[in-house]
Amino acid sequence: MAAFANTNGGLIVIGVDNNGNLVGYGPAGNSHEDIANIIGNGCDPRPTFQVERVDLTHPVMVVTVEAGPNPPYFVKGTIFIRVGATDRRISRAEFDNLIRRRLPAGT
């Protein structure tokens, strides 16, 4: 989630395996708010996101994460960015670019 907020935003789909197969979202009793708290509390600051249940052949939860207006976003003291289909720790040059994104134009 922090990686998406630190880059261009993105979607997290809970209920799809690593091969892209629809397996469904299983934990009974977890509401949208529960999911939001579980995934949102790991980031500092908490990025802007929405959680939506989508019923396909199996139910899935879709989390839409916006590109954060106030990067960097941390997970347990570490900054991640999204590169292709992976999350990775940020390099020094990428960190500098992330900070420049916060500065007013011409600074």
Image (cartoon, rainbow, N blue to C red):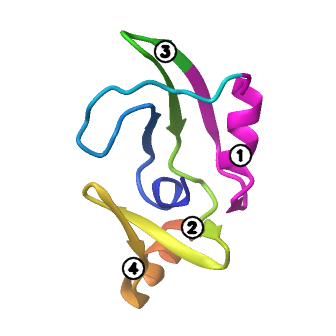
Drawn side of residue 10 relative to residue 78, left or right: left
10 Å neighbourhood of mark 3: few (<14), some, or many (≥20)?
some
Task: Give the foreground label among 4 and 2.
Answer: 4
Please rate how many residues cluster around mark 2, counting C-alpha atoms within 10 Å: few if below 14, some from 14 to 19, many from 20.
few
**Which amino acid type corresponds to the residue marked 2 in the rendered image?**
Arg
Q: Would you identify the image quadrant in which residue 10 lies? A: top left
**Residue 107 seen by the camera:** no
Which residue is at 53% across, 43% downward? 66
Q: Residues within 10 Å of mark 1 (few under 14, many from 20)?
A: few
Residue type of the residue flagged with mark 3 = Val
Secondary-structure class at tag 2: helix
Q: Is residue 86 above or below residue 92?
A: above
Residue 53's disc is none
- Disc on res. 54: 3
Q: Give the quadrant of residue 17.
A: top left
Where 37 sits versus 101, above or below?
above
Q: Earlier in the sequence, mark 2 or mark 3?
A: 3
Left/right placement of residue 102 relative to residue 43 reads left
Q: Secondary structure at mark 4?
A: helix
Q: Amino acid at mark 4?
A: Glu
Across and down, in percent, residue 38 comes to 71, 46
Between marks 2 and 1, how big is the CA–CA gap? Answer: 27 Å
Tag 2 residue: 102
Q: Which residue is mark 4?
A: 94
- Disc with the residue nearer the chain's start (4 vs 1): 1
Q: Nearer the viewer, residue 16 or 32?
A: 16
Amino acid at dot 1: Ile
Where is residue 42 drawn, in percent x and y? 69, 59
First in residue order: circle 2 vs circle 1: 1
Q: Are marks 2 and 1 in contact (CB under 8 Å)?
A: no
